[in-house]
Amino acid sequence: MVSVVNRHNKTIIIIKKHRPMTSLSHNNAQRPLQTALGNAVNGYFQQNNIAKTGNKALYQKAIIITLMFIGSYACFYIFPEPYSWLAWAFHGFATALVGFNIMHDGAHGSFSNNKRLNRLAAHTFNIIGSNAFYWKQKHNLNHHPYTNVAAADEDIEAFGLLRMSPDKPRYWFHRWQHIYIWLLYPLTSLFWFFVLDFLAYFNQKIGEQEFSQKYGVKESGIFWLSKAFYLLTYLIIPGYFLGWETTLIGFLCLHAIMGVLFAVVFQLAHVVDKTEFPKPDENGNLPYEWAAHQLATTADFAPKSKFTTWCVGGLNFQVEHHLFPRISHIHYPELHKIVREVCATENVVHREYPSVWQAIIGHVRHLKNMGQIDARVNDGCLEASSRLS
């Protein structure tokens, strides 16, 4: 079970696993950086008299992306082969855009100041194949509080296929992981939607961490109905009208594009050669205050590219997102300037890559490095780590 509490000026997450309960805490006795960032960002919104949630620009973009999503699906049935497969591939791109721009803001409660609209935006994840409840548990309550911490962040787990953290075991095949990732990443969404979702549902946990709340009758119903709807919409109906061979090839094209986009966009923010992987001491204490932890473990990329920002829903500004997850991504370009200024004043490193390509190089370089170096010496709150080569 995961729960967040405040104790003696420390933000603490309690993680109940198969081993004895472990607590991780940030060094929040003094929080000068978090205070400075909060004051600067709040001042920006107050001075400009604007809401922190989505605005007209976001809603216009959401409409365009929704039309791309619906239109590309309709093209499955309009275009003949092999052009129909291009429609499937483009639909994979449009689906990723729904996740980045609509679902992600909705799940963080930043899409709108209307709670119902936020829930609707978050539940688009059920429509595109996954599950909003599972995402909240994994992303909001697992990844965000303790980014890149091997004891808590399930996003740096890969069933041993990849070694992303120095606190994970290194196996002999990891020396080639920077190469074979390009064979694994196209499978990301397939594995996510059809394996991880079901493992989470039946085990009621993310990896080894139990859910903060169980699936109720309502959430269970949504889970099964949305999975049935997805299979009906993307396999059964197209299979009936287009034939099974065309449908299966198209389905794989869709997930290959979506999988690569999901994997790359989220990996470039954290699993790169500029970020850190903080390790708790034997008492579960992390070295940084919460805000400094986010800055140490997260990197921006392509901050000047309006096209990249539009497509990935501001997730190229992951530093700003991790510091202010309840602020809509539509504001991140402006927040980026503010955060950089505060970091310069506070003498804290703001990590970023000028382009997507340079971030990809940083990601590949990090994985290559992780495939060659030994694991760090372990302590009590991390799983045993050993070199097997």
Image: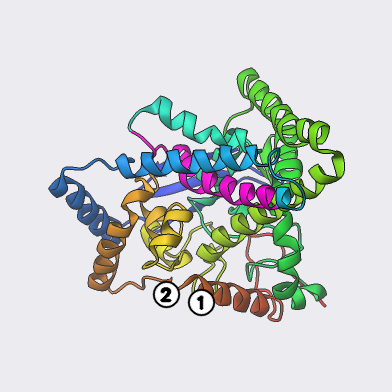
From what the image shows, is residue 290 above or below residue 236?
below
- Say above or below: 67 vs 228: below
Residue interval drawn in magenta: 86-112
Left-right relation of 65 to 366 = left
Residue plotted at (63% across, 65% down): 379
Q: Residue at x 67, y 24 (%)?
A: 220
Q: Nearer the viewer, residue 197 or 112?
A: 112
Residue 278, horizontal then vertical, whole percent = 52, 66
Asked if the residue at tag 2 contacts the one at tag 1, i.e. Cβ–Cβ closer than 8 Å, the answer is yes
Q: Amino acid at mark 2?
A: Pro
Location of residue 241 with respect to 30 vertically, above or below:
above
In the picture, the quarter occupied by the N terminus is: top right
Can you tell which mark lies on residue 354?
2
Q: Which residue is mark 1?
A: 358
Residue 185 falls in which quadrant of the image? bottom right
260 with respect to 7 (left or right): right
Location of residue 133 in the rendering, given as x and y in whole percent from the top left corner: 58, 33
Q: Is residue 97 magenta?
A: yes
- Of 271 and 192, which appears nearest the observer? 192
Labelled disc at residue 291: none
Main SS, magenta region, reads: helix
Q: The residue tagged with tag 2: helix, strand or loop? A: loop
